[in-house]
Image (cartoon, helix red, strand yellow):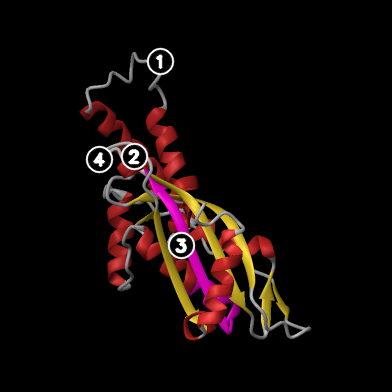
Amino acid sequence: MKNCDMPVHEIVAARLRAANVSFKANDNISAHVSGPDLAWIESDVAKACDALLKALVIDTTNDHNTKGTAARLAKMFMREVFAGRYHKAPNTTHFPNVTKLDQVYTVGPISIRSTCSHHFAPILGSVWVGVVPGKELIGLSKFTRVADWVFSRPQIQEEAVVQLADELERLIDPRGLAVVVKATHLCMTWRGVREHKTEMATSVMRGLFREAPATRAEFLEVIKGQGYGA
């Protein structure tokens, strides 16, 4: 794809605009980038990271600690902490709800790692999911994989919890879905007010969890035993 002097990020951005595709920080653009695209983007990111280090007046040529840091940053961004932007959703195997389970089951705490899109500082926390199933179920590990995929992007927690709920609802079409996220934001603990004890909790309640107070209360009581609120 790289056949001109235009930076690859500009080529990809032009392609996305032409297709009327959103490419905000927490959007997934995997349907519009190929393997070669990702390699070129990573190369562009490494050059930009090298320019950032030089702008910070760091002598990366003679500093043994930052030699190769630009390339490591690019690899980290593209393949790990922002992988949810560039890679497709994990494959999910569905199973029929043969026993017609119609009670609440919960999954959690699931560890999540994300990045604040305001300061690019880490967000570290946990997710709890409650489900009143419909006709289908998914494997336990798939909740973890989907959560990691959604949170591995520059995010704000208020939007990430909705994205995760939307994806789970699409996958399993449950009669009820609850998603609770509790996280520590290093943009508060590492910089800014440097408040180390503050956590943020967000929740999405849909279907029976929103309509039936007893169902919602059951879920919240169960996750207390799984560490929520501790």
Question: What range of the chain is rendered magenta?
Answer: 166-185
Which residue: 33% across, 51% down?
8
Residue type at mark 4: give it. Val
Location of residue 15 by image quarter: bottom left
The first of marks 4 and 1 along the sequence is 1
Question: As rendered, which of 118 and 82 lies closer to the eye?
Answer: 118
Q: Are marks 2 and 1 in contact (CB under 8 Å)?
A: no
Q: What label sits on residue 35 in the rendered view?
A: none
- Report how far apart the C-alphas of labels 2 and 3 lie in the structure: 32 Å
- Report how far apart the C-alphas of labels 3 and 1 lie in the structure: 36 Å
Q: What label sits on residue 64 in the rendered view?
A: 1
Residue bearing mark 3: 30
Residue bearing mark 4: 193
Q: What label sits on residue 189 in the rendered view?
A: 2
Question: In the rendered view, does 51 fall on the left or right side of 184?
Answer: left
Q: Where residue 71 sits in the image (x, y, percent)?
A: 42, 33
